[in-house]
Image (cartoon, rainbow, N blue to C red):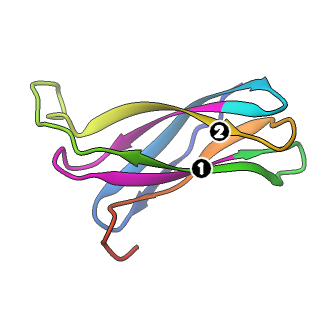
Amino acid sequence: MAWVSTSSAVSDVTFKDFGFSTTDATQAEIDFQVTREPGSAVKCAVKALDSKFAVVGWKVVDIPPGEPDTTADGGRTVSQRVAVRTESLSVSGVVDSCWVPGSSK
C-alpha cells in the first residue's frame, strides 16, 4: 500500500511520499523524495498514522545539503527512507512538512 502526496513550502522545498511499510507494532518506514537547492539543508517532519488517522509516531529528519551533480535536476532531488518508532500498529506514513531551517515557514 502506498500513499502519494506532494506539497510545497516557502523557500522552494517540495516533497513527495512514495512508500510506506510497517515493520511491526513499534516501527514503520516511510519513503519519500525531497527537492530543494543542492546547497540547502532541509528538515522534514514525518508521521505514522493508525487506522483512525491518529498519529502513532512522529519524527523530524535532517537532510544535509547536497552537491550539484550531473543528474537531470542537478542534484536537487534526494530520496529518503526513515524509520519511525510507533506507539501502536500504523497503517500509513506520510511527510507532514519540509522546510529550510532558519527560514520562515
Q: Does residue 95 appear to the left or right of 105 in the view shown? A: right
Q: Nearer the viewer, residue 85 or 21?
A: 85
Q: Bounds of the magenta span?
A: 29-47
Q: Name the residue type under label 1.
A: Lys
Q: Quadrant of the N terminus?
A: top right
Q: Nearer the viewer, residue 87 or 11?
A: 87
Q: Nearer the viewer, residue 64 or 70?
A: 64
* Count of numbered badges drawn on the protein: 2
State how far apart marks 2 and 1 are (Cα). Answer: 6 Å
* Prevailing secondary structure of the magenta residues: strand
Q: Is residue 30 magenta?
A: yes
SS at circle 2: strand
Q: Does residue 12 appear to the left or right of 62 in the view shown? A: left
Q: Does residue 62 appear to the left or right of 67 in the view shown? A: right
| Residue at image mark 1 | 59
10 w.r.t. 30: above or below: below
Q: Label for residue 84?
A: 2
Q: Residues within 10 Å of mark 2 (few under 14, many from 20)?
A: many
Q: Name the residue type under label 2.
A: Val
Task: Determine the residue positioned at 33% across, 34% down.
Answer: 78
Q: Does residue 92 appear to the left or right of 46 in the view shown? A: right
SS at circle 1: strand
Rendered location of residue 54, percent (x, y)? 83, 54
Rendered location of residue 66, percent (x, y)? 20, 39
Task: Determine the residue positioned at 40% across, 63% down.
Answer: 9
Rendered location of residue 101, percent (x, y)? 34, 64
Task: Determine the residue positioned at 23% across, 45% down.
Answer: 65
Rendered location of residue 82, percent (x, y)? 54, 34
Q: Are marks 2 and 1 in contact (CB under 8 Å)?
A: yes
Task: Determine the residue positioned at 11% across, 36% down.
Answer: 68
